[in-house]
Image: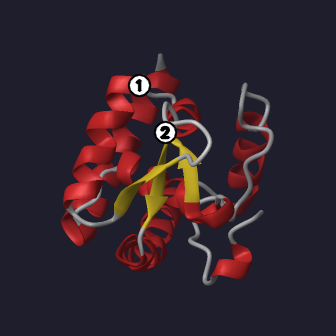
Amino acid sequence: MKLLRGHAALRRLINVQLQGDHGLTVNDFEALLLLSRADDGQLRRVDLAERLQLTPSGVTRLLDGLEELGLVAKGACASDARVSYAVITEVGLKRLKEASAGHTAAIREICDERYSEAELKQLSELLGRLPGAADANGEECSAPSGPEERSD
């Protein structure tokens, strides 16, 4: 129960920071980050939904908002009209880059206020055992600085 409550509280704090400073939600930020790291800055919408752990309708709502802001665009598949892509725009890359430094700093501040370096290391190791966390690293919240860094 503490893990769930802590996660919810941390997510609210991060949402407030991202929305106040950059007009983005945590999901918006994560979607832009995933797209920025994808080949050609695009992912199939169904793959993006899976990576964000959203339903197809949830990712549609998310992408509709990002499209209205000009941060992503729709892309079509030349070989299969049933497949559509979410594509990050130059404006989206710029917004992500602007948000990344503040986002990372806000998380660091929250953690530094509560944990020692040794505790953070232990916490990272423990959380790394959770399903889906093993591949994450400290650079996960940093936006690539150029196209050459998109294919991690």
Q: Residue 11's x, y, as percent?
A: 38, 43
Q: Residue 121's x, y, as percent?
A: 76, 53
- Pick whichever of labels 1 and 2 is earlier in the sequence: 2
Few, some or many C-alpha atoms within 10 Å of disc 1 (few <14, some 14-19, many ≥20)?
some
Q: Residue 99's x, y, as percent?
A: 39, 72
Q: Is 134 placed left or right of 52 in the picture? A: right
Tag of residue 145 = none
Q: Residue 63's x, y, as percent?
A: 33, 46
Q: CA distance from mark 1 to mark 2?
A: 8 Å
Few, some or many C-alpha atoms within 10 Å of disc 2 (few <14, some 14-19, many ≥20)?
many
Res. 131 in view: yes
Whether the residues at callouts 1 and 2 have beta carbons within 8 Å, the answer is yes
In the image, is residue 133 above or below residue 1? below
Classify residue 125 by image quadrant. top right
In the image, is residue 40 above or below residue 6? below
Callout 1: helix, strand or loop? helix
* Residue found at x 47% / y 16%: 1
Amino acid type of the residue that numbered disc 2 sits on in the rendered structure: Arg
Residue that badge 2 annotates = 45
In the image, is residue 17 above or below residue 4? below
Amino acid type of the residue that numbered disc 1 sits on in the rendered structure: Pro
Q: Is 25 placed left or right of 78 in the picture? A: left
Q: Is 50 placed left or right of 97 in the picture? A: right
* Residue found at x 70% / y 50%: 119
Callout 2: helix, strand or loop? helix
* Residue found at x 75% / y 65%: 151
Tag of residue 56 = 1
Quadrant, the C terminus: bottom right
* Residue found at x 28% / y 62%: 17
In the image, is residue 144 above or below residue 34? below
